[in-house]
Image (cartoon, rainbow, N blue to C red):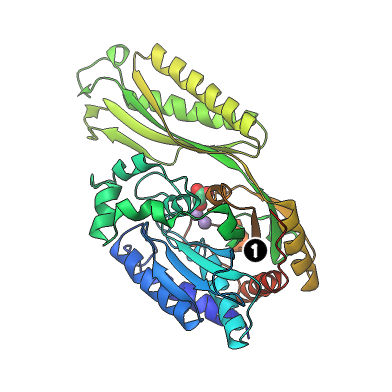
Amino acid sequence: MLSAERIMQRCDALARHSELAGGLTRVFLSPENRAANELVLGWMREAGMQAKLDAIGNVAGRYEGDRPGLPCLMLGSHLDTVRDAGRYDGMLGVVSAIECVAFFNAQKKRFPFAIEVFGFGDEEGVRFGTTMLGSRAIAGVFDERNLQATDSRGMTLESALREFGLDPKKIPQVKKERSDVLAYAELHIEQGPVLEAEGLPVGVVTAINGFSRLRVTLSGMAGHAGTVPMNLRRDALVAAAGCITAVEQIARTNLDVVATVGRIEASPGAINVIPGKVVFTIDIRAPRDELRLSCVDQVRREITAICEKRKIRIEIENLQELGVAQCAPWLIAQIERAVAAEGLRVRRLPSGAGHDGMALHAIADIAMLFVRCKDGISHNPAESISVEDAGAGARVLSRFIEEFRAVPA
Ligand code: GLV
Ligand code: MN
Ligand code: MN
């Protein structure tokens, strides 16, 4: 039997591995990440999988098909979280996939394909500022330069991997070929309000919106808050305030575009000092790549103009960019069949949030199943789903797997 209760309990168990007392923060390659990995490895083995930690820090489990060595249907999601996160974003997809495999294993059911379940080590990109390190390595699109990315304490990804007991030189070995992977399917909470508004427990994803991430550094002149007249200041934080408002305005005037300044740091950061330097991030997303790119151009132009007027030096770095990832029509059709067979209305919807499928798209056709979340809340400790919806999601996923038919590549 698929157990929705066990899925919920396992999400709770993972949530206990957190650096944040009384909340959930679990970043890539942290001690909490290691503890969560151990739990997931144990559950995978219990479910009849061979399981290991790979060279980039993904937990990878394999359930052989009706003979060894067959190409796989890849499932999973991520095990890292944002800061002060909810407990389902990522983890629900991993534990639901394990639950399905345990269900098949209990019936000694094997398929004409293997099943691989991944708990990706880094999807959120919280620690090193660049997302999907785990799934990008699997897809062979890991950028070696990312090894030199640093965390807030100045530790490089390369050192963090070594400290975790992993060998960065082996990262290229985790790459899968297109011929190894029949498809990638991910169950994930919706993280938005659409399914709840329509009274539906699950939805079928059509595409994942693309994103651009920028880091902007504004350099003005630090000075005494009491002595420098207002007309002689080069205050980087006031300039940043104008830039942030401009970012919001650009997103508001372009339908379907969303833009967020999620992090800002002002230096030197004292009550009586004019801020001389500000660094902030911008995250821009849209369902069409050309629309997103034109907004990025607009943002660059607008903030450059604002800073020129204020005599503020500006540097804009492109941190990361991922295009729209379309879900494959043949997989959408199979997920929809599974939804309908469970007696549920089929509802298609796009994903505004990013997911590992964006990286895996490079080697496999992808599909996603969304599970309703309460009040559309995510990236927030109030993120919540019902046990009934966890059950509905797992049933649809398991039916999809059982009836999965690979289309010839
Ligand atoms: C990941 O959750 C993202 O969409 O940023
Ligand atoms: Mn997330
Ligand atoms: Mn997620």
Residue sitting at x 31%, y 42%: 149
246 vs 132, nearest the viewer = 132
Q: Is residue 218 left or right of residue 299?
A: left
- Residue on which disc 1 sits: 372
Residue sitting at x 49%, y 77%: 49
The image position of residue 243, as x and y in percent, is 45, 26
278 vs 92, nearest the viewer = 92
How packed mark 1 is, by other alpha carbons closer than 10 Å (few <14, some 14-19, many 20 or more), is: many
194 vs 396, nearest the viewer = 396
Query: Is 49 above or below relative to 279?
Result: below
Q: Quadrant of the N terminus?
A: bottom right
Q: Quadrant of residue 304 in the image?
A: top left
Q: Amino acid at mark 1?
A: Arg
The image position of residue 235, as x and y in percent, is 31, 22
The image position of residue 205, as x and y in percent, is 68, 54
305 vs 62, nearest the viewer = 62
Query: Is 296 above or below relative to 90?
Result: above
Q: Is residue 135 left or right of residue 280?
A: right
- Asked whether the viewer can see residue 91, the reply is no
The image position of residue 32, as x and y in percent, is 32, 66
Residue sitting at x 43%, y 54%: 134
